[in-house]
Amino acid sequence: MGIALIGMTVAVIVVTAVVMASNDSGRDRVRTVEVHSAEAAIDATMAELQTGVPCTPSFSPASYGSGVTKTTVTVVIEYYDDAGAVTCTGTTASSTPTRAVITATSTADKTQVGTQPVRKVQSEVLLTPITNPGANAAIFSAAGFDPKSNFEVEPAVTGESADVWVDTGSWECKGNSGSGGGKRTVGSVFVPAGSLTIDLACEIQGDVWVQNDLTVTSNAYDAPITGTSGNVTVRSGTFSLAKAIEIPGAAKLGGAAPSGLTAVGGITDNLGAAAIPTLASVGLPQIQWDTTAQNVWVSEGFTINSAATFATYLKTGWGKSGTVNACSSWNDTATVTLPAGKNVYDLTSCSSIDAKKIVLALKGDTALIMNDLDITNQFQVSSSDGDPHQFWIILPYSTLAAGKGNIDSNSTSFEIVSPISSFIYAPGTIDLNPHGDYRGQIYGGVVAPKNKFTMDYTFVGVPGVDLAEGTSAIIGYDVELVNKHEVS
């Protein structure tokens, strides 16, 4: 009998130990699932932060697993900027945060024997806003980009970005074969409403962002996308390669990655367009010449002069004894020196400016406002005193409605001599024929340079005009993981 009792006691102890071990093992399995589900929620939250700063991720709370190990995960995001905590207003952060702390808490759906396991995983991430880059454009072409020959677009200051922005329509980047013959941009190319084809002798030394299709032909360079960044984004179209290429940055693709693509920064594909922050067409900035605009120029120290005043400088420079009309043909190679200070010459009283030959030397920042410009032989602007000055040719946006607003230089010379920096604007077609190095920016309805030229980008801008209007909104965030660890 005693032996039987001992045996029963041992059996009870063994069964109890087995049950306890089984319960512990079950809790361990649940804890493992909880940790995995919390880490997955952290990763999913980081993916959502790339497109915005929600108060709560769209998926939270979320279920993970099945059966006795099924868990529910909730996520809390705390935002901070340099001044401290950033609160939430509605569904998003009330201001632009610079970092976030993400806490994912996972609990078992089934009640466990003993202590209910709850696991928390926390991470800290740095948030860098990604903005639409149109404001930085060296060339902004609102309705297609139509260069007739080869060109190079470079930043005048090392480290800056010289971007080409094609607001609507597509671009076939195609140059000539041979040493130094291709079309090239040292900034980035953005095509927010069209496609881009990279063909013969085209080299893009920066990023590429394309809304629709990106095609690299068999005639393209072996390394058509170069530079220190060299990221490629194809949001809603197809990335097609006729030859294998390597890009120095990362590829972010809404569709599948093409065969033959190698990316030093990695390839993320099949994201779907909705997962990639979009760039939208913003339209050509509407630069006007009304009372409001004129008052802004005056407030920035400019004197507004009439066409008659400009005619006096033409007369002096050309050495004419009779009457000179600024609205008549400009046809003299003698240098016309314009005065020091900041001056605007309002030539809108002239239906059109016929500039057969004009050589301007500046002693100060100078703007010419006109309705239409036709250059048939020579148009040169240089510095009279050797100092850097800014120069504007502006055909106001309103001229387009009157059938004007175009610049045409035929096959003749248009030359802006360093250290002059220039901003050229026309709402119609800018059909320029630059010679030498052009320094500044070009904004137009259709930008169509005619001959091979080098453009040194430097920001000039326009008084009272926000070139970033409509383009400076934050379209996403670069999310950098600082740490991720289990809290409990």
Image (tube, helix red, strand yellow):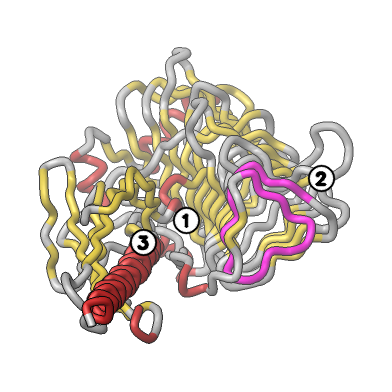
What amino acid does circle 1 point to?
A: Asn
Q: Secondary structure at mark 3?
A: helix
Q: Nearer the viewer, residue 407 or 42?
A: 42
- In the structure shown, which secondary structural element does the residue marked by tag 2 occupy? loop
Range shown magenta: 245-264
Counting residues from the start of the chain, the first of labels 3 and 2 encountered is 3
Q: Position of residue 58 (x, y in %)?
A: 30, 76
Residue 60 in view: no
| Image mark for residue 371 | 1
| Amino acid type for the residue under numbered disc 3 | Glu
Callout 3: 10 Å neighbours few (<14), some, many (20+)? many
At x 47% / y 13%, what residue is drawn? 386
Toward the bottom, the furthest residue is 67
Separation of residues labelled 1 and 3 (CA atoms): 62 Å
> Is 90 placed left or right of 230 in the picture?
left
Q: Quadrant of residue 217?
A: bottom right
Which element carries disc 1, helix, strand or loop?
Answer: loop
Three-letter code for the amino acid on which mark 2 is drawn: Tyr
Residue positioned 73% across, 46% down in the render: 246
Q: Which mark is residue 221?
A: 2
Mark 3 or 2: in front is 3
